[in-house]
Amino acid sequence: MVNEEMESSLKVTDVARVTPSNSDSSESLTLPLTFFDLLWYKLHAVERVIFYKLTDASRPFFDSVIVPNLKTSLSSSLSHYLPLAGKLVWEPLDPKPKIVYTSNDAVSFTVAESNADFSRLTGKEPFPTTELYPLVPELHVSDDSASAVSFQVTLFPNQGFCISVNAHHAVLDGKTTTNFLKSWARTCKNQDSFLPQDLIPVYDRTVIKDPMDLDTKILNAWHRVAKVFTGGKEPENPKSLKLLWSPEIGPDVFRYTLNLTREDIQKLRERLKKESSSSSVSSSPKELRLSTFVIVYSYALTCLIKARGGDPSRPVGYGFAVDCRSLMVPPVPSSYFGNCVSACFKMSLTAETFMSEEGFLAAARMVSDSVEALDENVALKIPEILEGFTTLSPGTQVLSVAGSTRFGVYGLDFGWGRPEKVVVVSIDQGEAISFAESRDGSGGVELGFSLKKHEMDVLVDLLHKGLEN
C-alpha cells in the first residue's frame, strides 16, 4: 500500500547563470531544427532528477566543495555543448524554429536546500509524485523563445544531494542529454576538460537527410494537433513555441519504482515461451522476439492496463521511441547532437486484449512484431504518427516509454559515487513508463510508474504477483 503525503519544503539559496568557459566574445552558433526535432517541439520537456547519497553532505561542504565543483565543470562542459547555453527561437519570417547561441548566453543553475526525507524519495515504497516537483528547475518557454536546458542542485543535509535537469525535447533527445551529463560528470570527477571522442558532439545537420519535405508535413500535422487541444480553434500564433497544455498533477498521483532482476526477466521469458507453445490463440507467423525490452515493456503495459480496469472494450494503445541513428542510411554518428528519434505507435486496441488470461502473451506478440518491423522508414512516418493523435477516441489509454536501459544513467559519477536513484519526473505528463538499467549493473531493468493512488495500489500488487507465479 502507498504511504500518505508528508510535508516538505524547499529553500532556494541561489539562482546563477553559468556561461561556457573559454567562449570567444564573438562566438555564435545557429542550428536549424530537423524533422526529428520538430516531432518533439510542442511536447513537455524531459525532467530528470539524479540522487546521490552522501552523509558527509553538510551545508559547509555543499557550499564550499560540491556547488563550486559542479559549477566549474558545468561551465567547462558547456564549452563543448554551446547550444545548451543558447535558446530555441522562431523568427517571424522563418519557416521553422532554430537553436541560436550567442556570446554571454548562459544556462540557469539553481542551488537549493530541502528538508524532504531523502531515503523516502530514493526508496522502494510509493510516494506522492508532487514531492519531486520542488527539485526540478523551471525551464523558460514563451511564444518566441525557449531555453534549451536548466539545472538545479539540491542539498538534503547529511543525507545527500540531487542534480536535476529540465531539457527541451526539441533541442536534445535522451541520447544527447545523457552524453552531456556523462561529459559533465567526467569533467567534475577528473577536474579536467578532456573529453573522449564518443562524448564530443557532432553538429553537422547534413547527416540528417530529408527526402520528402518532412519539415513542412510535420509542422502542418502539429497545427492540426494543436487545434484538437484547443477545441477546434485556430491557434492565435501558429509560430508559438509554447508547449502543449499539461494537466496539473494532484497529490493523489503516486510514484513507484520496480527493479526487475535478470532472474525476473528470465522467468518472464520462460513463461512467454511456455504460453506461446500452448496458446489457444493462433500463433503469429513470426517467431517471438524475446528481447529484454519486448519482455519488460509487454509485462509493464499489461499490468498497467489491468490496473486501470474498467470497461474491457475501452480503447488503448502503446508506443515507444526509436533511436534512428543506426537505422538511417547512411547511419548517423552516435554522438550527433539533437534529436534522431522517431516513434512507433499501435493504436485502436481494446483493453480486453491485455486483461484476458493471455494478455501478457498478446502484448508480447504485438510489441515483438512492432520491434521486428523497424527499419529506416520509421523516420518517414513521423507526420502520420502525429496525425494519429488527431483521431484518437477521447479517454484512450496510450502507454509509452521514457528513457532507455542503454543510456547508462547509473554510471553518472560526479566524484561522489554512483547515483542512489535516477527518476524521470516528466512521466507524470502522459502514461509513460521510465526505463533505466539496474543500479547494480547486473543486467536488470528499473521501471518507473506514475499513477493515481488507487490504481498504484493495484499495479504494485499485479507487478509482484506476476513475478511470483
Image (cartoon, helix red, strand yellow):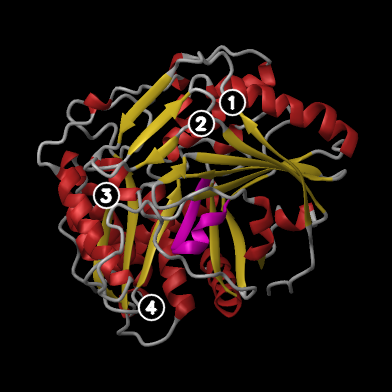
Residue 452: quarter of image: bottom right
Name the spot of residue 433 as percent of width and height, x first.
47, 58
- From the viewer's side, name the closer residue of 439 and 212: 212
Q: Nearer the viewer, mark 1 or mark 4?
A: 1
Amino acid type, residue under disc 4 in the picture: Met
Task: Kindly identify the residue that appears in the image at 52 percent across and 40 percent down.
Answer: 149
Marks 4/2: CA distance? 47 Å
Residue labelled with disc 3: 371
Dot 4 and dot 2 residues touching (CB under 8 Å): no
Task: Kindly identify the residue that appears in the image at 39 percent across and 61 percent down.
Answer: 244
Amino acid type, residue under disc 2 in the picture: Ala
Magenta-span inclusion, residue 431: yes
Residue 250 left/right relative to 173? right
Residue 251: quarter of image: bottom right
- From the viewer's side, name the closer residue of 149 and 252: 149
Q: Which mark is residue 355?
A: 4
Q: Nearer the viewer, mark 2 or mark 3?
A: 2
Determine whether 127 is above or below 87 in the image.
Answer: below
Q: Earlier in the sequence, mark 1 or mark 4?
A: 1
Please rate how many residues cluster around mark 4, counting C-alpha atoms within 10 Å: few if below 14, some from 14 to 19, many from 20.
many
Amino acid type, residue under disc 3 in the picture: Val
Span of residues in magenta: 424-436
Marks 2/1: CA distance? 7 Å
Quarter holding the N terminus is bottom right
Furthest residue to the front? 92
Marks 1/3: CA distance? 41 Å
Which secondary structure lies at badge 1?
A: loop
Name the spot of residue 111 as percent of width and height, x first.
73, 41
Task: Kindly identify the residue that appears in the image at 37 percent across and 87 percent down.
Answer: 311
Q: Earlier in the sequence, mark 4 or mark 3?
A: 4
Residue labelled with disc 2: 85
Q: Which mark is residue 19?
A: 1
